Amino acid sequence: VIQKIYRYYLLTHTTTVQLYNLSIFHSLTHSASQLTKISAMSTSQNIMGEQAIRSEISSNIKSTKANVCPFTIRLAWHASGTFDKNDTSLQAGGSNGATMRFSPEIDDGANAGLAIMQAILEPVKRKYPKLSYADLWTLAGCQAIELMGGPEIPFNFGRKDEADGTTCP
């Protein structure tokens, strides 16, 4: 799935792509017990209505007034940019934690303007308070790819939010 996303992104954004570890929409890949917990969270989250959440995201990122799909992908990309598939600890980086909400991460020059995108998605978070910001931003990136004509991207819920910025990279 990640390779498909990367190929699609390269084809549509070749002038802005920087080659990093391209795991932006990667599900957490840890031990079997952790995956079981994530799977259970995914099931309970789906009861909440993945399609309803996707629909709400869609209405916030694409309308007759604006289309912020590329900006949404940038948020997912930057939120997950520290992911390291070789790190099997819970500190593997990526979107888990959603620490881009806090200084110093949101103030980093590379993240300039992403607070605007976070604000655009905030009504979705208010409507679905059990949804983590980490899952919201990642799912929004998946949904943005689809809205721009890309493939449907399967999604697994289970990312957690950090309470403060003490773990910012």
Image (tube, rainbow, N blue to C red):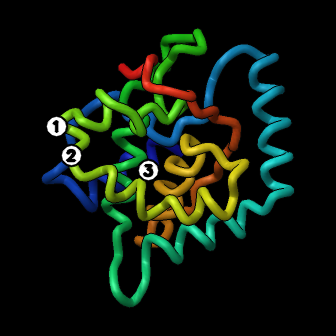
- For the N terminus, the image quarter is top right
The residue drawn where x is 81% and y is 27% is 37
- Inspect the image, locate mark 1, and give the three-letter code of the amino acid beneath it: Gly
Closer to the N terminus: mark 3 or mark 2? Answer: 3
Residue holding disc 3: 5
The Cα atoms of the two marked residues, 1 and 3, are separated by 25 Å
Q: Residues within 10 Å of mark 1 (few under 14, many from 20)?
A: few
User: Helix, strand, or loop for circle 3?
Assistant: helix
Is disc 3 surrounded by few (<14), some (14 to 19) or many (20+) residues within 10 Å? many
Secondary structure of the residue carrying numbered label 1: helix
Q: Which residue is mark 2?
A: 112
Q: Position of residue 117 (x, y in %)?
A: 36, 58
Furthest residue in direction left, as rendered? 15
Q: Position of residue 140 (x, y in %)?
A: 51, 57
Q: Nearer the viewer, mark 3 or mark 2?
A: 2
How far separated are the C-alphas under marks 3 and 2? 23 Å
Relative to 59, residue 114 above or below? above
Q: Check whether the beta carbons of the residues at disc 1 and disc 3 lie within 8 A of each other.
A: no
**Residue at image location 49% in from the left, 27% down from the top:** 164
The extreme bottom residue here reads: 64
Which residue does the numbered mark 1 point to in the structure image?
A: 109
Observer-nearest of 53 and 141: 53
Q: Are marks 2 and 1 in contact (CB under 8 Å)?
A: yes
Dot 2: element: loop
Above/below status of 60 relative to 36: below
